[in-house]
Amino acid sequence: METILAKSNRFEVGGEVLESWLCKIFNVNKQQDWPIASILLQREKNRIEVGESYWLRADPVHLRVENNHILLGDNQILNISLKEATSFADSINEFFSDEGVTLLPLHSDRWYVKCDETPELQTFLLSQVVGKNINDLLSRGKEGAIWNSRINEIQMFLHEHPLNRNREIQGELPVNSIWIWGGGVRPSEVRTSYTGIWGNHVLVHALAEMGKVMCHDLPENADEVLNHSGNSGEQLIVLDNLQKYACYRDAYNWRNELMKMERDWFDPLFQALKKRQIQQLKLTIINESSTKDFVLTPGSLWKFWAAVRPLGTYS
């Protein structure tokens, strides 16, 4: 990977998170939010009519108070089952039936809310807040205070919920809040220049389905991608396993995962480029500070003056 970075032409633009970057790759415009909820609904097993309604994600989370910070954890640490999700959502819906807001737990950690009218609301993507202090990341806009108040009521309701007491007895963290995000109306058009896509992220598959692009689950290594008979044109490979460790500052597993990526992906793709099996390799590194593109061609390998530097110097 260090050699790829050293020999590449480098381009840098503003910061992103994976979901916003994927939306841009598929030419999906930002509405008040990135319309993740309405896009993902087509991937759920219980398919429902999306229509032109405004949909929000309303996912179960765990909040922990540390000093004057409120830190948020997602399902990576909650390990909530679909049965638990359904029970939590049913009891919340029953208790707040007069609010006109109904939670739909279509997946264990993907809950949805349908809005009859478009709310004046701006939210932060869940991936932007995991492992962070949420004090300055609450919903905004004219209706932000209304939604934040609803969530506060849900937090109080969940505080003594029997399901949470059972979870704590079993050594699990309680589900003590929800996080709303990804609101919007389903986009009318989704398109991309890629002819094949490889990845496990649910948004990758949803966008590919809408854009009518062949999408594959991520294989164990690059060999299947390189040897796939249908490979023509640009192929997009989404390697997002580092994110779950970065969010929780898990440096040990982050480094181990990076070493696996080096062995299974970066080295085979680099060798394929040297053999001219592929004509160009572009590595896009995404974070909220900046998005960096490193573009490597066979001719770039002759840059004898481009010294290979430690990975940390590129951050």
Image (tube, rainbow, N blue to C red):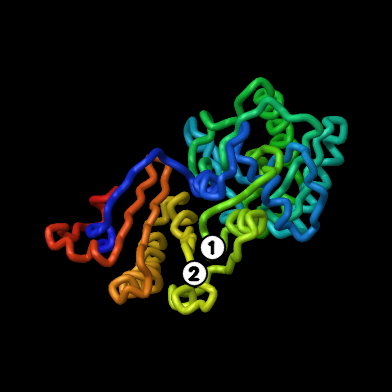
Q: With respect to residue 200, does 156 lie above or below? A: above
Q: Is residue 136 above or below residue 108?
A: above
Residue 101 percent location from the top left of the image: 80, 35
Question: Badge 1, how many Cα within 10 Å: few under 14, some, many 20+?
Answer: some
Residue, x 49% and y 77% (percent of image)? 224
* Residue 132 locus on image (x, y percent): 48, 40
* Viewport quadrant of the N terminus: bottom left
Which residue sits at x=67%, y=53%?
109
Residue for badge 1: 195
Q: Residue extending furthest top?
A: 142
Q: Give the class, few, some or many, for how many residues have Cα within 10 Å of label 2's Cα (few <14, many ≥20).
A: few
The furthest residue to the left = 305
Specify whether 74 is left or right of 51.
Answer: left
First in sequence: mark 1 vs mark 2: 1
Q: Amino acid type of disc 1?
A: Thr
Instruction: Compare residues 287 and 65 and report the one nearer the observer.
Output: 287
Task: For marks 1 and 2, give the CA distance.
Answer: 7 Å
- Amino acid type for the residue under numbered disc 2: Ser
Circles 1 and 2 in contact, beta carbons < 8 Å: yes
User: Could one spot residue 75 in this view of the protein?
Assistant: yes
Where residue 89 appears, x then y in whole percent? 78, 47
Above or below — where is 121 with respect to 173? above
Picture residue at 49% right of the left edge, 36% below the top: 133
226 or 103, which lies in front? 226
Q: Badge 2 is on which residue?
A: 232
